Amino acid sequence: MISSRVSALSSSSTLKITALTKKLKKEGKDVVNFAAGEPDFDTPSFIKEKAKLAIDQGLTKYTPSVGTSEIREAICRKLKEENHIPCESSNIIVTAGAKYALFAAMTALLDRNEEALIPAPFWVSYPEMVKLCGAKVKIIKTKAKDNFKLSIDGLSRAISKKTKLLVLNYPSNPTGVTYNENELKAIYEAVKDKNIIVLSDEIYEILTYDGAKHISFASIGDAHKFTVTVNGFSKSFSMTGWRLGYLEGANNFIEAISKVIDHTTSCASSISQAAGLMAIQDKKWPQTMREEFEKRRNLLFAGLSALKKIKPIKPSGTFYMFCDIKKSGLSSVEFSSQLLDKHLVSTIPADSFGAEGYIRLSFATSAQDIEKGIDRIKVFTEEL
Ligand code: PMP
Ligand code: GLU
């Protein structure tokens, strides 16, 4: 009864464990939530007020499928000024979340049997989206000793005649690694002139630490001609439930992707778009959140570094900390589920990110909970 494409899919481990954690908390269990894939801050009130006003003003109807001209212009200004991407507002499509931007782009660009290159560890949804498009997933393994960065050698070896797409995600979910300008230039040199489209998911751009600066792939050389940049409001403005994302790309890509939107979601929520227009003009709030995350990263890293059988990798971006748990003798799933069952600490096992032997901890939780979580992990790992 079920299509073979969907039968071959796994469900999302991140969404499943996040839902389980929320359920346990609702039941009154004192769970430390290191599974969260969303900022724990409330959406700022100036954004919420704008949404209420939008409803009162009757902005409650379909918008153009690619988004309102106002928000597309504001996004275009941001991408030009902050990301140095040479674009026009006609190169922007506003979507129902960045996740849908990625899927709509893959649907429009990937043909059956063409290959999409995905560096591992990867965010759970990339391979499943490629499979849904009927295309082929080609994983490029990265090494812990390279900080999980894509090596040019590994990339060049993976490129074949069938390669259509390279998925880049930095700062990376789940490793927290990000790329500097020289590393991006090297990737650019390896893919240019090869008829490959780069799908660059930069949704965590605001969250970089130790002074690291986010550079958009599409700002390197003429990469904007073959790059679709994806971003959104979920992480930068703590708006995960509003379902608001966007993409930028060359005219021919936009034309194709907009057809997919026309026949699927019609448009992103009109109310969320009005609120997003307000959000994108504010530069201060995301920075305040970033500073708080940097403090929590330092707290979690210091605490876990003192423990045996778990080795944290210091992230240069995102709110995730990737941890090597191979010394525990447990698999990722065993480690994660025993930690939750015995000590009420929820984490995501990284087998679903293509990295057995690791788990992902999110520090999108209070400093108090981070300290409590470290204490519980200490007890758990000492018992092993
Ligand atoms: N890309 C990455 C790497 C993510 O972690 C997420 C988190 N959900 C998304 C895209 C999608 O974000 P959203 O659909 O909420 O905009
Ligand atoms: N991106 C987040 C995570 O990795 C949210 C859940 C999801 O969409 O996968 O946990």
Image: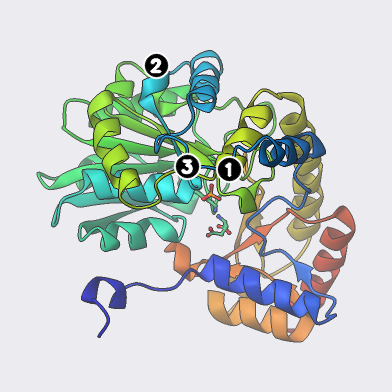
Q: Which residue is mark 3?
A: 62
The amino acid type, in three-letter code, at marker 1 is Thr
Reading the chain from its start, which is encountered first: label 2 or label 3?
3
The residue pinned by badge 2 equals 88
Image position of 297 with respect to 375: above or below: above
Residue placed under numbered mark 1 in the picture: 60
Instruction: Give the image location of residue 366, x and y in percent.
Output: 84, 55
Dot label at residue 304: none
- Contact, mark 2 vs mark 1 (Cβ under 8 Å): no
Q: Quadrant of the C terminus?
A: bottom right
Callout 3: SS? loop
Left or right position of 128 against 55: left
Q: How is the image coloured?
A: rainbow
- Some atom of ligand 1 lies within 8 Å of the CB belonging to the residue at label 1: no
Q: Secondary structure at mark 1?
A: loop
Describe residue 303's horizontal placement relative to residue 275 as left or right. right
Q: Can residue 326 be seen at all in this image of the molecule?
A: no
Q: Is residue 348 left or right of residue 201?
A: right
Residues under numbered marks 2 and 3 in contact, where contact means CB atoms less than 8 Å apart: no
State the CA–CA distance, disc 3 to disc 1.
7 Å
Query: The residue tagged with tag 2: helix, strand or loop?
Result: loop
At x 50% / y 20%, what residue is drawn? Answer: 73
Work out whether residue 313 or residue 116 is closer to the camera in this orientation and state it: 116
Looking at the image, which residue is at 58% across and 46% down?
Answer: 176
Give how far across and how far down residue 79 sits, in percent.
50, 21
- Left-right relation of 299 to 194: right
